[in-house]
Image (spheres, helix red, strand yellow):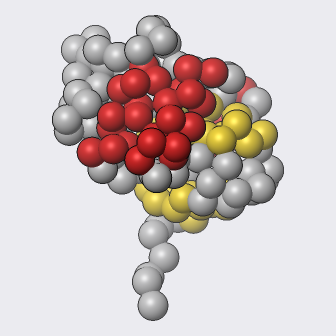
């Protein structure tokens, strides 16, 4: 499957598919990557080390600075896959690349494709937007 690339990059890892939109500002602890929004169904889960899949982002323009800080600290997502476009997360990923040298690809899928990949356990993202499904993390040789 090929998605629309909003921020190019390469990433591979387990998928954390959120069931509802999330604002990173106030919704994620920038020091740990843990979802702290008490009413969010994924409260207590951690975005660190995952491909973060969200149907949409919610909230503040400050989410871009939270994403950049998560990535700077090494507790951010490996990549982000969205069901709806979000310019604020794109800005955060671009800032993290420019200021800290940390890549976090951001891809856009249509609603139907997003619903399909939300059930994946593991995925790889290529710089051209190709998304590959994996059932488990492959062995490192």
**Residue 2 location, x and y as percent?**
80, 50
**Residue 10 location, x and y as percent?**
60, 59
Above or below, 61 against 1 in this view is above
Q: 27 left or right of 107?
A: left
- For residue 66, what is the image quadrant? top left
Residue at (43, 83) in percent of width and height? 140
- For residue 88, what is the image quadrant? top right
Of residue 101 and residue 8, the one placed in the foreground of this image is 101
**Residue 95 location, x and y as percent?**
50, 35
Is residue 45 visible in the rendered structure shown here? no
Above or below, 129 against 40 in this view is below
- For residue 70, what is the image quadrant? top left
**Residue 56 location, x and y as percent?**
57, 21
Q: How many marks?
A: 0
Of residue 57 and residue 111, the one placed in the foreground of this image is 57
Above or below, 109 against 9 in this view is above
The image quadrant where one finds the C terminus is: bottom left
Residue at (22, 22) in percent of width and height? 36
Residue at (47, 67) in percent of width and height? 136
Above or below, 61 against 47 in this view is above
Is residue 69 visible in the rendered structure shown here? yes
Outermost residue on the front side: it is: 99
Residue at (41, 31) in percent of width and height? 67
Outermost residue on the bottom side: it is: 141
Q: 34 left or right of 89?
A: left
Of residue 25 and residue 137, the one placed in the foreground of this image is 25
């Amino acid at each position: 499957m090929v998605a629309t690339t909003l921020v190019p990059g390469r990433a591979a890892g387990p998928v954390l598919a959120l069931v509802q939109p999330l604002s990173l500002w106030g919704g994620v602890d920038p020091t740990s990557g843990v979802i702290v929004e008490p009413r969010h169904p994924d409260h207590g889960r951690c975005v660190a080390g995952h491909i973060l899949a969200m149907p949409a982002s919610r909230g503040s323009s400050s989410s871009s600075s939270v994403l950049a800080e998560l990535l700077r600290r090494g507790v951010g997502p490996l990549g982000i896959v969205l069901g709806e476009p979000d310019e604020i997360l794109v800005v955060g990923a671009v800032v993290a690349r420019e200021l800290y040298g940390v890549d976090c690809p951001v891809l856009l899928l249509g609603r139907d494709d997003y619903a399909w990949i939300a059930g994946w356990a593991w995925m790889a993202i290529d710089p051209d937007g190709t998304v590959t499904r994996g059932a488990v993390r492959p062995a490192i040789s």
